Amino acid sequence: MDQHGFDDPVARTVVVVNAQRRGATPPDLMRRHFEKRCAAVVTVPWDGSLEQGALTDMSSLHRRTRESLIDIAAAVADNFVKQETPS
């Protein structure tokens, strides 16, 4: 996208990378690619409660998973710009 004039949206993007299986970590090359271009890269660890892909009870998630979801929300909120209201 940045090669087609969408530099600003790319620079504000939050990339979420999730581990697809127990013990897996995303390749460093992929993380570095996005870290150079985007506002944030957040990794969500593998969590058996997410594996089924359905509605998930947050209390069933591991602590690290819940913390990474909070990190995602914070990174997205960092991109909110307060709009001034006309007087």
Image: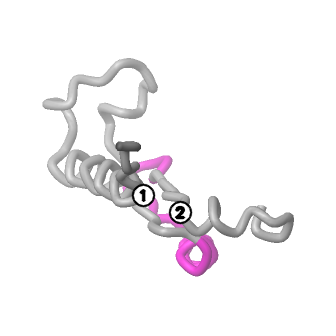
Q: Nearer the viewer, residue 51 or 73?
A: 73
- Left or right of 30: which side holds 40? left
Badge 2 marks a residue whose secondary structure is: helix
Looking at the picture, does residue 86 appear above or below residue 25?
A: above
- Residue 58 percent location from the top left of the image: 20, 30
Q: Which mark is residue 79?
A: 1
Sequence-wise, which precedes: disc 1 or disc 2? Answer: 2
The residue lying at 41 percent from left, 32 percent from top is: 51
Q: Residue 12 carries which label?
A: 2
The residue lying at 29 percent from left, 55 percent from top is: 74
Which residue range is magenta in the image? 19-37
Q: Distance between the residues labelled 1 and 2?
A: 6 Å
Q: Residue furthest right?
A: 4
The residue lying at 45 percent from left, 60 percent from top is: 24
- Residue 3 percent location from the top left of the image: 83, 70
Q: Do the residues labelled 1 and 2 touch (CB within 8 Å)?
A: yes
- Left or right of 12: which side holds 87? left
- Residue 70 percent location from the top left of the image: 24, 50
Amino acid type at mark 2: Arg
